[in-house]
Amino acid sequence: MTDESFVKSITMKARVDNLEAMSAAIFSLTDSQGESAAQEDIYFTVTNGHLKLRINHPSKHYGTLIHYKNNYRSGININEARVTTLDDVEPIKKTLSTALGVLGLIEKERRVYVKDNIRINLDEVDKLGLFVYIEVFTNAQDVTAPMKSVMEIQKQLGIKDRDVIAKSYIDMLLEIENPGSRSFDDETNSSDASY
């Protein structure tokens, strides 16, 4: 059983130095304790945008296949994604791994806070560290209002501009594992970056 949807969001990612302070700030904004999940993102080698298979643990069967393109504007990202939910990820994992090749693997612990059309994630990413990831979902063609919302949330959470990162987790990991090499974005499209 699968279900496909198109998702558009305005996003921002930033490094976090103080987990306790950031958690308190997010709670103050969302009035939520959040929900935790362990996620494994398998990135495949593609030439058009980005493609990853997200496996949610502890269940190793359920997951989502996500294809998306991003456009960064001064650290704020316009993300357009096609998301397909999967009841059994193993067959598609084997097929895509064989057909496309695996670019890399991101493993993280994610705590998700939701309020209205806003989702804030606290991510502890293996080998990379701690990050906050802001998402404001929209159906509008004009993204001016949701971009302003992201900037307002940035202020409310006390995120400094120097901590904002316009780069995907997989690109960050590849730079660590292959210092001096071109990033995945360089090899595809500089305006594309994974969330």
Image (cartoon, rainbow, N blue to C red):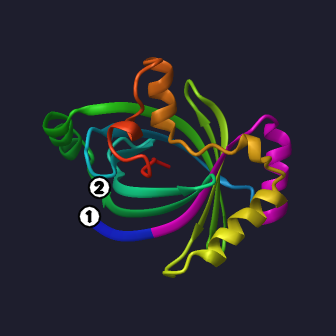
Find disc 1 in the rendering and name its residue. 2
> Image check: 82 left or right of 180?
left
> Residue at point 35% right, 55% down?
66
Q: Is residue 71 left or right of residue 105?
A: right
Above/below status of 89 relative to 143: above
Magenta stretch encompasses residue 20: yes
Residue 6, percent across and down? 37, 71
Quarter location, residue 174: top left
For the N terminus, the quadrant is bottom left
If you read the primary sequence from the N terminus, does the residue marked by circle 1 or circle 2 appear first? 1
Percent coordinates x, y for residue 164 in the rendering:
68, 45
- How far apart are the two marked residues, 1 and 2, measured between alpha carbons? 7 Å
Q: Which residue carries the number 2 mark?
A: 87
Mark 1 nearby-residue class (10 Å; few <14, some 14–19, many ≥20) = few
Quadrant in the rendering for residue 142: bottom right
Magenta span covers which residues?
8-31
Q: Is residue 97 left or right of residue 72?
A: left
Viewer-nearest residue: 118 or 10: 10
The reply to whether the C-beta atoms of the residues labelled 1 and 2 are less than 8 Å apart is yes
Tag 2's secondary structure?
A: loop
Type of amino acid under label 1? Thr
Horizontal side of residue 25 vs 173, given as left or right: right
- Type of amino acid at the residue the image marks with label 2: Asp
From the viewer's side, name the closer residue of 84 and 33. Answer: 84
Q: Nearer the viewer, residue 127 or 61?
A: 127
Q: Which mark is residue 19?
A: none
Q: Residue at position x 40%, y 44% from top? A: 59
Q: In the image, what residue occupies the spot 58% across and 46% down?
A: 166
Q: Is residue 168 magenta?
A: no
